[in-house]
Each structure stands twice: as C-alpha cells, then as structure tokens.
Image: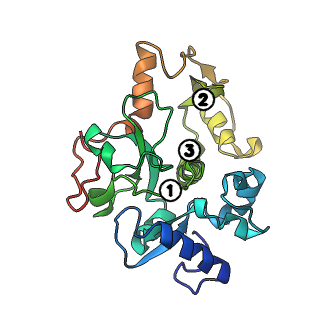
Amino acid sequence: MPSNSSPFEAPTTAQTNISARVNQRDFSCRISDHKDCTSCVHIVPKTEYEWFTSNGMDLYNLEVQPSGLSIMDDIRNVLRLRHDLHFDFDNKKFVFVPKPIPTQLSSLLPNSTSPDRVSGSGSSRPLSFVTHVLKPTHELGRLYHNTLLHPTPGVRPEFILARFAWTIFPSVTPFLERGIPRSLIRLSASGEQIKYEIVETDGYACRVIAGIPPSSAASSRTSSPKKRQRQPSLDGGENEGNELKRRFVEIFNTPPDDQVEHQDRGRTLTR
C-alpha cells in the first residue's frame, strides 16, 4: 500500500489479522505463484481513505469494519504479491485489466471465482483479469505481461477497476496540461447502453479539464470544443465508429502478437 512507511515494517494487530486471512486464501503470489518473499497489498490504497469512504466503497466489503483506516482492511480489498511485484504495483508499473482468454486456457479458471471471470463482455470468450504492464521494463513485461491472475476468490472487481483508475489518472493530467488541442472521447452510460462522442477540445479547455484555474490556463481560447458526429453505442456502428472503437479497446481486448509465453506457468495470453 502506498504510504510513508515501508511495507516491510512490523505490522499492527489489525494488519496481522488480515494478513493471516489473505495468506490462507492466497497461498502464493497471485501473479508469479511464488510463496517466499510475499506481502499483502491493498488494491484500493489506504492513502485513498477519503475517496474510499465518500464513494461508499465499503459496500463491497465482506464484513462491516470499524471506522477509520481499518475500513479498508477487508479481505476483498487485499491480495498477496511477491515483494518486488508489490513495489512495482505501488509504483504504477502495471495494472490488472479484463481481457478475453483463449479457449485452451479456460480450464485454468474456476467457474465460480470472482473476479477471475467477468461477465457482460459481449464476447464468445470469457474475460479474465490479467497483468497489463504500463511502463518499459527489463524483465517485468517479458515475464508477466498478459499473465492470468491466479484465483482470488472473493476479491471484488470494483476494487480492481478503481485501482486501474488510480494508476492511470496521474498520466492523464500531464497529457491535458500541455495546452495542445486534443481529440477527447466522452463516454456516457444509460442503463446497459454506453455511448461515446469525440470532442475536439482546444488547449485552453484541456488545461481547465486538468484542474488548472481558468485564470491560470492559456491566455486565450481559440474556440469552443467542437463535437464530431455522435457515434452509436459501443456494440454497433460502421466505418469510422468501428475503427475508433477498435483503437479504443484493442489495448485491453487483443493480446499482443509478440507476447512470449511464461514457460513456468503457461498462463500467458497468446494468439
């Protein structure tokens, strides 16, 4: 968990209790399957306590926890990782994302384990959470990119997706702060229908979206954001809409062609 203290310091009584329960459930690192040199990792970091409570994330907890930081010490918000992977996870080098899995790997996943299988994908292939490396590395990407997460029964996908947002949002801010016109995708949801539109946004508006006060943003605004023609829902569309949809989701839906299978486990997504 990201904090001012080291993850290897002596744990408190509450941390010891949750660690014992997690270690009983996750008998090894959920990525590498190693049993030595592992520790418990909060999926939604304890530094995000205010966000966690204000958004009612404790509704996904297994148990009613006392008030304070211990509300995040729930077995559904914790998993076991090897120390080096714990460090890289907290330094935003990788995330867990749902991707379609090849038929030959389907047998590796328990039918009832959540969040290992994710429904509602609209695909004939089931989805599973895998490790997705975000930064260049010497070994991490080669060994674990697109590696299936080992079973973590009870861990809520809502926590994993919140962690995904926590990881990538810091990279969005510099992208918008540069004051360069951007083509932004705006999503809106109504029931099960998800719609999107491409908004051509000038540099001034991008900086305002990034949280820069209007008085400190660009000195002039060239024009108001212009909307391209709204596309149909993500499950339909032709021509440009389908091409945009492909580009928008391919990083998560399509395993890379050059992925090297991890020989020790055979749990890596390949075509």
Q: Classify mark 3: residues with Cα within 10 Å, few (<14), some (14-19) or many (20+).
A: some
Image spot of residue 70 (x, y percent): 71, 70
Q: Is residue 193 above or below residue 107?
A: above
Task: Give the SS element for disc 3.
Answer: loop
Give the residue furthest to the right: 67
Q: Could you give the CA–CA distance between mark 2 and mark 1, rounded to whole angstroms?
A: 31 Å
- Label 3 belongs to which residue? 178
Task: Give the SS element for disc 2.
Answer: strand
- Label 2 belongs to which residue? 187
For badge 3, the amino acid type reads Arg
Look at discs 2 and 3 and give the one toward the viewer. 2
Along the line of sight, the residue nearer the viewer: 196 or 222: 196
Quarter of the rendering occupied by the N terminus: bottom right
- Label 1 belongs to which residue? 153
For badge 1, the amino acid type reads Pro
> Along the polypeptide, which appears first: circle 2 or circle 1?
1
For badge 2, the amino acid type reads Leu
Quarter of the rendering occupied by the C terminus: top left
